[in-house]
Image (spheres, rainbow, N blue to C red):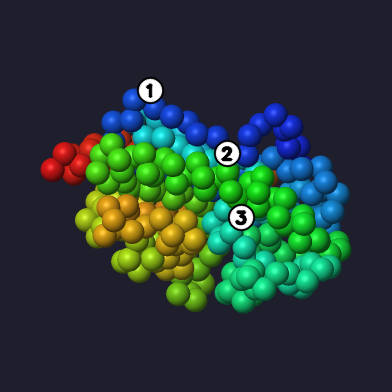
C-alpha cells in the first residue's frame, strides 16, 4: 500500500492556529500539541527516515476529532508543526547533548527521562524508536526551532488560559492526544483501554472533573483508564494548578478507533469517534459553565 506523505510545510501557515468560538461561553480550552503535519523540506532532507516514518510520532487528525469545541463555546489551539521537528509537550530546553556538534549551555536540561528516551524538545528518535537524523545538529538550530515553534505555542496557550480564568474565575484545559493502538497497559500484552485520562496522578485536575469525563466516556462505550501508561506530559503538569483554579486533563485516544495507522488516513470509525467526542465536549462545556457560575 502506498502511504501518503505529509504535506510540505507552508511558508504562510503560522506555527499555531486557534479556532475561536464566536463567544466563549465556558471555561474550557482545548489543545492539540502533536497533530501538526507540516514537515519542512530541510527536515526531510536531514532525516534518515522518509515522511511516513517521521509521522510515527504524530497524533494524526486529533485537532479534527475535537473540532466541535468552538461550536460549544471553547477555543481549540493546535500546532501546525510536527512533534518530531519540535515538541511543545516538553520543557523549553530538554535536549540530548549527543545530538549536537557543539557543546550545549550549562542551563539546558540534558538529564531528564524524556531526553534519555530520545524524546526531548528536539527529538532524537520517533516514538517507535527509529533514529531521525543522519548527522549532528547545532545548538543554533535548536534555538531557531524553539523560538519559531515552542515559544509561540506556549505564549498562545498561556494567554488563552489566563484570559479564560480572568473571565470565568477558573480554566479547564483539555490536552488532546492519540496513542498507538498496540501500547499495552502495565506491561501486559493486551490493550485494556480505548482512552487513557492523565491527571498527573491526581495533581493537575479536580477529581470531580476527571470523574465527569470518565463517566461520560464509559457511558459512550469506551474502556477508560487513568494515568496508565500516560499520566500527562509537560503541558498537563505545567499548567494544571488546581489551587490556582486551573485544571489540566490529558486525553489519549487509541488510534485504531478513528484512523488507519499504516496509511495515515481516516478509518470507517472516524465519524463515530468524532461524534462521541463532540458529545463529550458538549457535556463538559455545559458542566464547566455550571461550575463557574457556582
Of mark 1 and mark 2, the one earlier in the sequence is: 2
Relative to residue 221, is residue 273 drawn left or right?
right
- In the image as oriented, which residue stretches furthest toward the top? 22
Crowd tier of the residue under label 1, counting other residues whose Cα lies within 10 Å: few below 14, some 14–19, many 20 or above:
few
Is residue 67 at all visible to an observer of this figure?
yes
Measure how far apart labels 2 and 3 are at the Cα level: 13 Å
Measure how far apart labels 1 and 3 are at the Cα level: 30 Å
Query: From the viewer's perspective, is residue 186 above or below residue 192?
Result: below
Is residue 249 at all visible to an observer of this figure?
no
Q: Secondary structure at mark 3?
A: loop
Identify the disc placed on residue 87: 3
Whether residues under marks 2 and 3 lie with C-beta atoms below 8 angstroms apart, the answer is no
Measure how far apart labels 1 and 2 are at the Cα level: 19 Å
- Residue at 44% x, 60% y is 238
- In the image as oriented, which residue stretches furthest toward the left? 294
- Residue at 39% x, 27% y is 21
- Quickly name the residue at label 2: 16
Amino acid at each position: 500500500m502506498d502511504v501518503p506523505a505529509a504535506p510540505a510545510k507552508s511558508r504562510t501557515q503560522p506555527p499555531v492556529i486557534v479556532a475561536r468560538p464566536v463567544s466563549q461561553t465556558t471555561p474550557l480550552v482545548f489543545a492539540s500539541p502533536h497533530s501538526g503535519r507540516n514537515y519542512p523540506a530541510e527536515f526531510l532532507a536531514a532525516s534518515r527516515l522518509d515522511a511516513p516514518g517521521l509521522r510515527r510520532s504524530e497524533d494524526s487528525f486529533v485537532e479534527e476529532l475535537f473540532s466541535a469545541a468552538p461550536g460549544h463555546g471553547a477555543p481549540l489551539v493546535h500546532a501546525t508543526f510536527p512533534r518530531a521537528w519540535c515538541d511543545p509537550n516538553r520543557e523549553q530546553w530538554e535536549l540530548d547533548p549527543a545530538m549536537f556538534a557543539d557543546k550545549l549551555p550549562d542551563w539546558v536540561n540534558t538529564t531528564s527521562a524524556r531526553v534519555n528516551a530520545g524524546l526531548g524538545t528536539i527529538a532524537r528518535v520517533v516514538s517507535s524508536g527509529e533514529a531521525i537524523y543522519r548527522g549532528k545538529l547545532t545548538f543554533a538550530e535548536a534555538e531557531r526551532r524553539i523560538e519559531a515553534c515552542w515559544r509561540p505555542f506556549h505564549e498562545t496557550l498561556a494567554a488563552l488560559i489566563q484570559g479564560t480564568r480572568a473571565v470565568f474565575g477558573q480554566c479547564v484545559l483539555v490536552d488532546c492526544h492519540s496513542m498507538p493502538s498496540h501500547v499495552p497497559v502495565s506491561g501486559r500484552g493486551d490493550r485494556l483501554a480505548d482512552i487513557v485520562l492523565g491527571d498527573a496522578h491526581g495533581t493537575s485536575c479536580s477529581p470531580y472533573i476527571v470523574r465527569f469525563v470518565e463517566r461520560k466516556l464509559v457511558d459512550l462505550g469506551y474502556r477508560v483508564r487513568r494515568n496508565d501508561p500516560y499520566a500527562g506530559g509537560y503541558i498537563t503538569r505545567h499548567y494544571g494548578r488546581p489551587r490556582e483554579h486551573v485544571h489540566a486533563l490529558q486525553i489519549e485516544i487509541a488510534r485504531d478507533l478513528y484512523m488507519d495507522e499504516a496509511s495515515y488516513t481516516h478509518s470507517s470509525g472516524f465519524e463515530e469517534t468524532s461524534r462521541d467526542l463532540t458529545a463529550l465536549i458538549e457535556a463538559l462545556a455545559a458542566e464547566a459553565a455550571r461550575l463557574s457560575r457556582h
